[in-house]
Amino acid sequence: MNKKITFTFLSLLLSINYAFPCTNFLVGKNASTDGSTFITYAADSYFLFGSLHHSQAAIYPEGAMRDIYDWDSGKYLGEIKQARQTYNVIGNMNEHQVCIGETTFGGLEELVDTTAIIDYGSLIYIALERAKTAREAIKIMTDLVAEYGYCSEGESFSIADPNEVWILEMVGKGAGSKGAVWVAQRIPDDCVSAHANQARITQIAFSDKENCMYAPDVVEFARKEGLFSGKDSEFSFSDTYNPLDDVALRVCEARVWVFFQAVNPDMYKYISYVKGQTKERMPLWIKPVTKLSAQNMKNFMRNQFEGTEFDMTDGYGAGPFHTKLRHSPLTYFVDSVEYTHDRPVATQQTGFCFVGQMRSWLPDYVGGIFWFGVDDAASSCFVPIYCCTNKVPWCFSNDNGSLLEYSSTSAFWVFNQVANFAYGKYSFMQPEIVKVQQQWDTHFNELASELDKTVSTLSQKDAQKLLTESAIKQSEDLTNAWRKLGEYLLVKYLDGNVKAEKDGKFVQNEAKIPPTIIRPGYPVEFLREMVKERPDFRIKSKEELENRE
């Protein structure tokens, strides 16, 4: 008799170490303002140093092998057969405009095969090295795990090219059972989708071979393991391999909800689902009421639940200066009761984030723009890096600093310095950061438009040279500007006080000393709470002071 696998939501473990990492948004070509497809990704982890990946296009000899190292830990896993030809990959996009992101959903602990060779990160970058289309990437990824096994937890992958956008969800079969069970669903061209550390594909469209792919044993394996006993038409991938719980709703599905309700107000009704009050699940995809641009997608990646009751900058946890920062762990106990912080799209533990933009009407080398940033997206910027770029800017290099080695020329450390300084007095500093951020957004959007026109008259080789040089220059310019921003904020807000400005310059006397220092103190609502806690701090009432005078 088959023993039913006990559900142990792996993401509970992840909440301790990784705080439910990663968010992906997906947009079909007819849901965008100009016919682009989009996928976004925030690579969120306290253990991830934000850098830009690059692998050069290459030709390999017959019989060559490729070493596999776990993307998260660096542990050597084994070797696989190398492809005869690989493509240029910059970040998570290749020279054919194939782009891949992911979020970890964990799933059933017993289905993790630690003896396998292929991890989720290797799957992404191997597929990018070998695939010309999203469909080809899906086949490469699923063939690889069938041959070499899958050693990671359950994953949702966003996979897109200039014409199609897909979600691939995959979970292993456990030790001794090579391969994985998986399903891939194409998102309709006029729709958007999202996933955030919770499997979202439910019923499988078995008869729609054009828009749905799946492992042949995706249902049969569940039956064999005692996870499912109904008809094929009743089978739900998510409910079987990654059942929802209260934490998954509030921490994971809430990030999908905030995107959905922003692009279609009708989706606001699912707030009751996110709160665990109702059972009706959000759809896998929806139609936005207006079409979306690259700038829209950048802004969505900066979301902190603004305008909703989950707004990170409101409430007691936000403190007197309305910070979005919530110190980990994500879940915590008070008087033997477990609670959770809200978990926004833009979060402090982001290593890197991107908006992948793919455009079918342009040659591949100029069609794909990998909008790339590091650290917390709410206080970061996205540099336009074209998919033909064949060199990593030093500021984004994995050799320039690490999590344990500070580097003043590393964008990751420069952006973290600014963000971490601002968290302490967020209501004062974040608007200053956003002002500079918007200036760079405008500059980069205009620059991309100019580059599109310029390279249209160049050969592919010359275009690649120009676009690589542009990526390097703009990345370094941005990093230098952010370093200057950090210096400015330090001077202006030193020791919690504020120095006055006039016409963009600090007010000062001939000795370069400010004639006055603004001491804003605490907001009155916070002072009232302080007084409740320590009434013995009382000195005199206003009336008593007036009588004394």
Image (cartoon, rainbow, N blue to C red):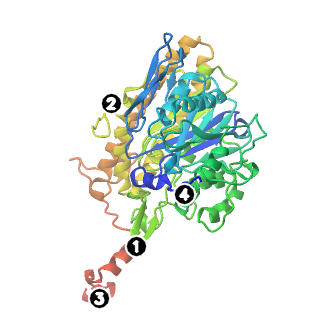
Mark in front: 3 vs 2: 2
Q: Amino acid at mark 4?
A: Ala
Q: Say few, some or many: other residues with alpha carbon within 10 Å of mark 4 (under 14 / 14 to 19 / 20 or more).
A: many
**Disc 2 to disc 1: CB gap under 8 Å:** no
Sequence-first disc among 3 and 2? 2
Q: Which residue is mark 2?
A: 400
Q: Amino acid at mark 2?
A: Asn
Report the front residue among 321 and 130. 130
3D distance between C-alphas at marks 2 and 1 = 44 Å
Looking at the rendered structure, the secondary structure element under dot 3 is helix
Q: Which of the 4 quarters of the picture holds residue 362?
A: top right
3D distance between C-alphas at marks 3 and 1 = 46 Å
Looking at the rendered structure, the secondary structure element under dot 1 is loop
Q: Which residue is mark 3?
A: 544
Q: Which of the 4 quarters of the picture holds residue 270?
A: bottom right
Looking at the rendered structure, the secondary structure element under dot 4 is helix
Report the front residue among 445 and 407. 407
Sequence-first disc among 4 and 1? 4
Sequence-first disc among 4 and 2? 4
Sequence-first disc among 3 and 1? 1
3D distance between C-alphas at marks 3 and 4 = 55 Å
Q: Which residue is mark 1?
A: 336
Residue 267 at x, y = what percent? Answer: 69, 57
Q: Say few, some or many: other residues with alpha carbon within 10 Å of mark 2 (under 14 / 14 to 19 / 20 or more).
A: some
**Disc 3 to disc 2: CB gap under 8 Å:** no
Residue 202 at x, y = what percent? Answer: 68, 50
Query: Relative to 363, is 344 above or below?
Result: below
Residue 327 at x, y = what percent? Answer: 38, 58
Mark in front: 3 vs 4: 4
Residue at image position (38%, 48%) is 419
Mark in front: 3 vs 1: 1
